Amino acid sequence: MPIDFSFPAKVRDLVSTITPLDIFDILIVAMILYKCYQMLQDTRAITLVKGLMVIISLTVICGWLNLHVITWILQKSSEWLFIALPILFQPELRRALEHLGQGQFFSHGASLLDKKAADLVVDEIVKTAKKLSQTKTGALMVIEREMKLNDISITGIHIDGIISSEFLLNVFIVNTPLHDGAAIIRGNRLISAACVLPLTENHGLSTELGTRHRAAIGLSEQCDALIIVVSEETGTISVAEGGHLTRRFDEKTLAAKIRPAFVQKEDLFFGRFLSRRRDDR
């Protein structure tokens, strides 16, 4: 059987037609797809995307095998699914539009605090959560990240005060106007308290989870915030992120969980290198 050498030649011909504008075009599309994946990662929407990919793959395979009836059913199902996409992906589409409106779609993260200031804020929040857990005082603390939570903060009482453990503990004193609701934290400031959070529509959650936990999960489904929950019944510390709730945090694990939300990206990636350079000097 003669060997066909035409394939490499075709590849060379194809590569020769690529211009710098084509490469730029491909890079932009790749960046957009990557940012979309980042927004969908660790959310319920990623499962829907996988389901769509399975249906599209099955449609291609059945078409190649000439299974006309199954192919027709899958094609019709795909058409209806694409019509339903704006409804299914409503939180993610809203998040993408808010990122575009704030000019943060291609950003690598919010510039918040340097490492020293971030460590101070994290220590104060962890200290607060520990004391609230010991006294079984219910609390919701929302740590804002890239997506601004102005629409949530206006539902509560505007404060704008520097974060400290004593300050946060006073906010969550039982039977006071600020106790019920969530406290919104932006950088090293508490910007609002007694805020109302949206409840999750996930009916498969454990019956052990009360309104605070469901509100924390509900907000985490719609934005990239970290929500710390202290249970009033058990004193358990939990964190909601991306529609998921992780429970039973202690001081060490809670600090490790929330620290990246405050530290600048430069500190996370280049902190050791820069500190080493400063030590050398």
Image (cartoon, rainbow, N blue to C red):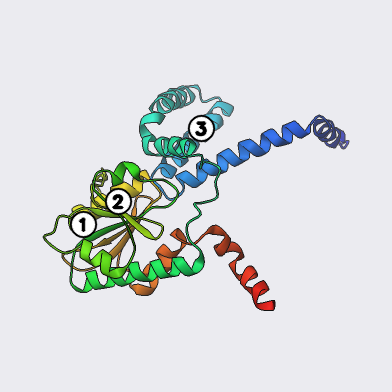
Say the numbered circle drawn on residue 209. Answer: 1
- What is the spatial separation of the Cα atoms under label 1 and label 3, in whole angstroms? 37 Å
Image coordinates of residue 229 in percent, x first then y, are 27, 60
Q: In which quarter of the image is the N terminus?
A: top right
Quick one: 280 or 261, which is closer to the camera? 280
The local secondary structure at tag 2 comes to helix
Amino acid type, mark 1: Leu
**Residue contact between numbered discs 1 and 3, judged by CB atoms under 8 Å:** no
The local secondary structure at tag 1 comes to loop
**Residue contact between numbered discs 3 and 2, judged by CB atoms under 8 Å:** no
Q: Earlier in the sequence, mark 1 or mark 3?
A: 3
Which residue lies under the disc numbered 2? 217
Which residue lies under the disc numbered 3? 56
| Residue drawn at (65%, 73%) of the image | 278
Image coordinates of residue 202 in percent, x first then y, are 27, 45
Does 202 sit above or below residue 19?
A: below
Q: Which of marks 2 and 1 is nearer the N terminus?
A: 1
Q: Residues within 10 Å of mark 1 (few under 14, many from 20)?
A: few
- Depth check, mark 1 against mark 3: the one in front is 1
| Residue drawn at (50%, 34%) of the image | 58
Does 233 sit above or below residue 52?
A: below
Residue 229 appears in view: yes
Quick one: 171 or 56, which is closer to the camera? 171
- What is the spatial separation of the Cα atoms under label 3 and label 2, in whole angstroms? 31 Å
Left or right position of 162 against 7: left
